[in-house]
Image: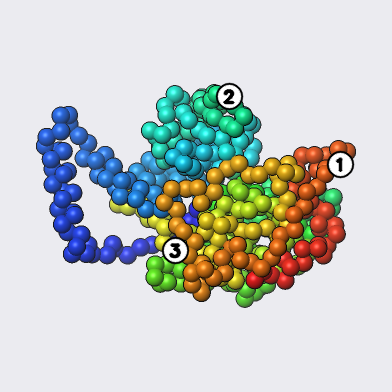
Amino acid sequence: MVADRAVSFAAPAPVTPGAYHELDLFARVLSYIENNYVEPVDDTQLIYGAIKGMVDTLDPHTLFMPPEMFKDMKVDTTGEFGGLGIEMAEKNEVLTVVTPIDDTPASRAGVKPGDQLLEIDGEATKDLGLAGAIKKMRGPPGSKAVLTIMREGFKEPREFVILRERIRIVSVDSKLIDGYGYVKIKNFQDRTDRYLKNALDGLREKNHGELHGLVLDLRNNPGGLLDQAVRVADRFLPGGEVIVTTRGRSNRNMEEERSHDRDTEPKYPMIVLVNGGSASASEIVAGALQDNGRAVVLGTQTFGKGSVQTIIELDDGSGLKLTIARYYTPKGRSIQELGITPDVVVKEGGGEDDAGPREVDLKRHFKNEGGLDGPGVKTASATGVTPKIVAPAPDPKDKLAAEDVQLRAAIDYLKAWPPTASTARTGTH
């Protein structure tokens, strides 16, 4: 659930004088352990453990990855790995499912957002931690994993036996619904924008050369690469519009991403679907299209992750995912803790709340410090838009409404364009 930015870093800054005493203390403790511990110790594991302990005092999205885990992370960005297909987060010190990725072993086995993952193959997840649990769920295709899950409504934990598969995540799906385009972006990988262009061109070809409207589905999209989120938003915006602003420590290193005229889609009516599983890069896209008046955002409140991470590869093959900046929507809103407020609220199932954890539930998460203009200004909850709450009663004869109330509401809004939530088309304040 990150907006990752891969960058090259200069050499680390010199250690400040005040830190030398602490480093000397660390060296002494390491020496005591190496020379006196009752059993031989692995120096590398000691150092990795110390680094992990240091990083674990920071925000929940900063992570140290030993070489094997770092290799797995790089594989993730290509969209192919052996595993189950689960996005997780830590909520109240319990590993909790954010979402099972569509059409993966986990989703087919019935794993649901909000499920508490207690054990993997009999080993307690509280002992594994988030990184360890991810590693343990990975494995060769065809191998078996046993997940012990507790869910609201269960009297006791249940075991889910799932066979790992080669998870090939083509990050974009598309189809025509009632003559309107529907595109689902599952996550933001290194080819997502290319997949999106192909999907839109394919929909046009199927619909006699043009699209009359589009539903962009970002539900349960945990995020991914920042540059891909920017490119996706750019595709729907005319040149010169602000997409996202990032700002580092003490407001240093401020960067602003703007749209370009090249390859911009026609300005057909557009709905963006979001929910509590829409995080980070998904929220960047939704916020950019909402603030620029390009689309109506429909669904439920998003995850609320307003920080940017960079990936640093270290000399021994390990890696550091480091939070380096906060990001802000085009109108200067910070969505940290709060998320994107939809213009039109349509709850899943016509009335169910999102069950998964959000940023505000994570330990050590950043507090919302307001927008670009300072504390308490232009936060996501102060958009000036009063969402229209829609509680549709699905027609039992309408198969789409019975399967997906939010998608049916989006299609109905496109048919009735311009929708009554016209404030969204002119931007939010």
Residue 227 point in image, percent of width and height: 53, 61
Assess disc 2: are there few (<14), some (14-19) or many (≥20) residues with their C-alpha within 10 Å of its C-alpha. few
Numbered label attached to residue 325: 3
Along the line of sight, which residue is nearer the eye, 81 or 51?
Answer: 51
Residue lying at the far right in this picture: please name it: 397
Q: Nearer the viewer, mark 1 or mark 3?
A: 1
Name the side, left or right, on which 193 lies relative to 200. Answer: left
Residue type marked 1? Asp
Name the side, left or right, on which 223 lies relative to 130. Answer: right
How many numbered dots are placed on residues in this image? Answer: 3
Q: In which quarter of the image is the C terminus?
A: bottom right
Q: Nearer the viewer, mark 3 or mark 2?
A: 2
Residue pointed to by mark 2 = 155
User: How far apart are the two marked residues, 3 and 2, measured between alpha carbons?
Assistant: 43 Å
Residue 102 sits in which quadrant?
A: top right
Residue pointed to by mark 1 = 395
User: How far apart are the two marked residues, 1 and 2, measured between alpha carbons?
Assistant: 33 Å
Residue type marked 2? Lys
Looking at the rendered structure, the secondary structure element under dot 1 is loop
Q: In the picture shown, does residue 82 fall above or below 1?
A: above
Q: Earlier in the sequence, mark 1 or mark 2?
A: 2
Query: What residue is rendered at 86% in x and 41% in y?
Result: 395
